[in-house]
Image (cartoon, rainbow, N blue to C red):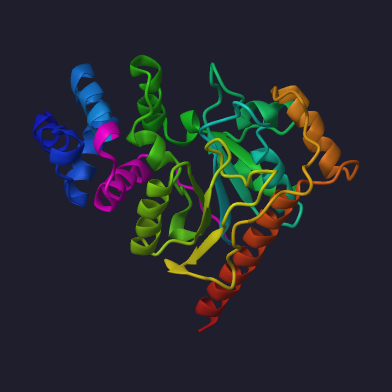
Amino acid sequence: MSISTYIKEIGRGKEGARSLSSDQSYDLMSQVLDGQVSDLELGAFALAMRIKGESVDELAGFLRAVQERSLKLSATTPVVILPSYNGARKLPNLTALLALLLAQNGIPVLVHGPSTDPVRVTTASVFRDLGLPTALDADDMSHAWARREPAFMAIENLCPALARLLDVRWVIGLRNSGHTVAKLLAPTTDGQSFRVVNHTHPEYGDALTSFLQRERADAMLLRGTEGEPVADPRRLPGLDVFLNGQMRPELSVAAQEGVLTELPVLPRNIDAATTAVYIQSVISGEKPAPGPLVRQADCIAAAWRTLTGDRAHERSA
């Protein structure tokens, strides 16, 4: 099979390209994930979508193809999903700290992302230095949640086909649509998830808002820290909460405005070992947690309790 017909549509440049339907996007991504395209076609697809950007229909189709090829995880209560695909470049990667703050309150948390990155500090490496095991299957996750620990699963185990697409980045030097879809992946069955979705540019925020509304998603949307799903420890970004695709202002938090009067004390080095030591000192109470992360954790917890209550009410009705 060939995806040349699709490339003709999406590859005409930013102004001339046409978006695909959800079904066309599903077919395209299915062929890509199943290895049915040539390396040349794969590169053309990655570059064309990078220039054009994904429409809501394309995101829906791409995600449906990825979800079908992902490990299915069952849960009795909504699982908070933290997709971690960028890692640290200038600031400490505190995604694991957010996950631990939530897990300490009895909230099941799944973090997924790459196990390694040659240029950035991954959440996987911070988990390892914290002594938190990597989950290989659903049982490992359940055991972590029973211990009130977050579970981390490498994308190589969660969806090997998507992991291969993400690795195309190291050949062509650019991220591709797989990275966008990875941040939307919720592998739990029966919609038992609350996704924390982050963006790096305002236009992506608008597109993701439309996507979450269309898909009737339960999620938090924020401008992440260096592409991670965690609030900037120096200044709180806006935290938009969606339940069943509806924006919930009473559960959301406005962005912090004005001049900062105090900065958190963060580690000077961002390597995984130093970051893990810092996180341990926060969890033990030796050091205070950055205010924006505490506010984000509280916001997620409030949304999770509301969602859990709504689901319980639906079952009893």
Residue lying at 58% horizontally and 65% vertically, measured from the top left: 252
Residue lying at 57% horizontally and 23% vertically, measured from the top left: 120
Q: Is residue 301 above or below residue 187?
A: below
Residue 2 % position (x, y)? 12, 28
Q: Give the range drawn in magenta.
A: 50-76
Residue lying at 19% horizontally and 18% vertically, measured from the top left: 40
Residue 102 % position (x, y)? 70, 52
Q: In this view, does 70 lie above or below 92?
A: below
Q: Which residue is the extreme one toward the front? A: 259
Q: For this view, does 314 lie left or right of residue 211?
A: right
Of residues 60 and 282, the one nearer the viewer is: 282
Q: For this view, does 52 lie left or right of residue 153?
A: left
Q: For this view, does 263 lie left or right of residue 174?
A: right
Q: Which residue is the extreme one toward the bottom? A: 317
- Tell whether position 75 is magenta: yes
Q: For this view, does 231 lie left or right of residue 113?
A: right
Q: In which quarter of the image is residue 172?
A: top left
Is residue 149 visible in the rendered image? The answer is no
Residue 10 % position (x, y)? 17, 37
Is residue 160 visible in the rendered image? The answer is yes
Residue lying at 65% horizontally and 61% vertically, measured from the top left: 299
Q: In this view, does 256 lie above or below 12?
A: below
Of residues 219 and 10, the one nearer the viewer is: 10
